[in-house]
Image (tube, rainbow, N blue to C red):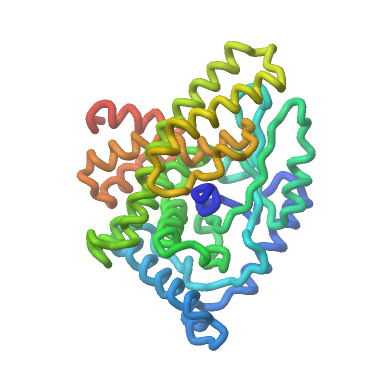
């Protein structure tokens, strides 16, 4: 699913709980650093294709807009370019308990507990996933096209990011810049939902400024947004129901019963939700084999964004004011609840 592929993944090459992982991450991060070239230099190279040149010019424009108009962190990020001979820059491992909707957490210094672990090679990610007892855990491995080092290192534009449409690229750049601007320790899901919401809204503001309300890119983005909101309501309701089902059947969940229960979710999606869509961003949901790890990955990015929407509306769709309020949550142990309480009270502290 597209949002899982382009959404920001946070990878710290300088931290890790195992020496081998530290060496792996540090080595591959160093390779990326040593391979980067200034975008302005790449734009002048004869080997740069017209499409690459167009998208790199777009990167420069979106970066300036994000910093100047949206008030996001100004940095040297996305001023360099790296070509990668792989469809993804990293591979993410996620794990969940087999009989409850609870993620397995990895701990890293500085960023705290996170429900994923990243590798620069697919084989190591698959090896990590294979190390989990299949009777106790579900696992999910996915490739991603971009990640943020949260300002610790200079982030480059990666060739993996250029295969998306213009509006998708604009969205992921703003998404990642939100991460650099604000990251709340041990609250990965909140951070990702925040960046998902603000990345999309920031991208819409960019196209409203540069192309106006008749923008074809904005129309595509609005169709995606329409579908995302419908899917968000659907998956939020289904995950809450599934969590309750696990609790009610604790100790009695068989493989067969679990598989049947997950098939019910896909059947409802096919008959009730998919016909409402305007685009095809969720076309594979009904086909894949669901498990708890995959569903929790969806929860990270697709779970209800309604509180962020209410906050944005409270500040009259003012991106900067919304971002400034969210910055007050830095250090908050329960940012989701604080946000919910704030919007429930009509914005009153």
The number of callouts visible is 0
User: Does the rendering let one see residue 23?
Assistant: yes
Residue sitting at x 72%, y 48%: 125
Residue 336: image location, x then y, percent:
41, 32
Left or right: residue 347 versus residue 16 is: left
Q: Quadrant of residue 69?
A: bottom left
Left or right, 295 with reference to 229: right
Image position, residue 326 (x, y; %): 35, 42
Examine the rendered structure and indicate whether residue 277 appears above or below residue 214: above
Residue 23: x and y in percent read: 75, 57
Residue drawn at (53%, 56%), measured in percent from left and top? 148
- Going by the image, does 216 lie left or right of 193? left
Along the viewing direction, whichever of 70 and 214 lies nearer the viewer = 214
Front-most of residues 324 and 336:
336
The C terminus sits in image quarter: top left
Give residue 81's quadrant in the image.
bottom right
Residue 335 in sight in this render: no
Q: Is residue 285 above or below residue 251?
A: below
Residue 31: x and y in percent read 68, 68
- Write the residue at 69% across / 37% down: 139
């Amino acid at each position: 699913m597209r949002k899982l592929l382009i959404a920001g993944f946070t990878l710290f090459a300088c931290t890790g709980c195992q020496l081998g992982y530290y060496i792996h991450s540090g080595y591959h991060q160093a390779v990326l650093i040593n391979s980067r070239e200034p975008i302005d230099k790449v734009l002048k190279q004869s080997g740069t294709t017209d499409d690459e040149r167009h998208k790199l010019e777009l990167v420069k424009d979106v970066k300036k807009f994000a910093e100047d108009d949206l008030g996001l962190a100004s940095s040297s990020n996305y001023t360099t370019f790296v070509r990668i001979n792989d469809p993804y820059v990293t591979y993410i491992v996620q794990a969940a308990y087999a009989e409850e909707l609870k993620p397995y957490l990895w701990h890293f210094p500085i960023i705290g507990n996170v429900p994923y672990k990243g590798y620069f090679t697919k084989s190591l990610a698959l090896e990590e996933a294979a190390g989990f007892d299949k009777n106790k855990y579900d696992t999910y491995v996915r490739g991603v096209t971009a990640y943020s080092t949260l300002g610790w290192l200079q982030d480059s534009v990666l060739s993996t990011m250029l295969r998306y449409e213009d509006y998708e690229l604009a969205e992921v750049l703003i998404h990642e810049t939100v991460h650099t601007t604000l990251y709340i320790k041990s609250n990965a899901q909140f951070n990702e939902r925040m960046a998902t919401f603000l990345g999309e809204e920031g991208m819409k503001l960019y196209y409203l400024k540069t192309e106006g309300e008749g923008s074809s890119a904005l129309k595509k983005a609005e169709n995606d947004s329409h579908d995302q909101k419908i899917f968000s309501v659907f998956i939020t309701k289904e995950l809450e129901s599934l969590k309750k089902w696990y609790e009610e059947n604790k100790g009695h969940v068989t493989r067969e019963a679990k598989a049947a229960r997950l098939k019910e979710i896909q059947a409802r999606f096919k008959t009730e939700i998919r016909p409402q869509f305007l685009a095809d961003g969720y076309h594979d949901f009904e086909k894949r084999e669901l498990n708890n790890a995959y569903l929790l990955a969806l929860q990270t990015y697709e779970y209800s964004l309604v509180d962020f929407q209410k906050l944005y509306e409270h500040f009259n769709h003012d991106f900067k004011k919304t971002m400034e309020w969210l910055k007050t949550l830095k250090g908050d142990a329960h940012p989701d609840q604080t946000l919910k309480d704030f919007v429930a009270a009509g914005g009153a502290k």
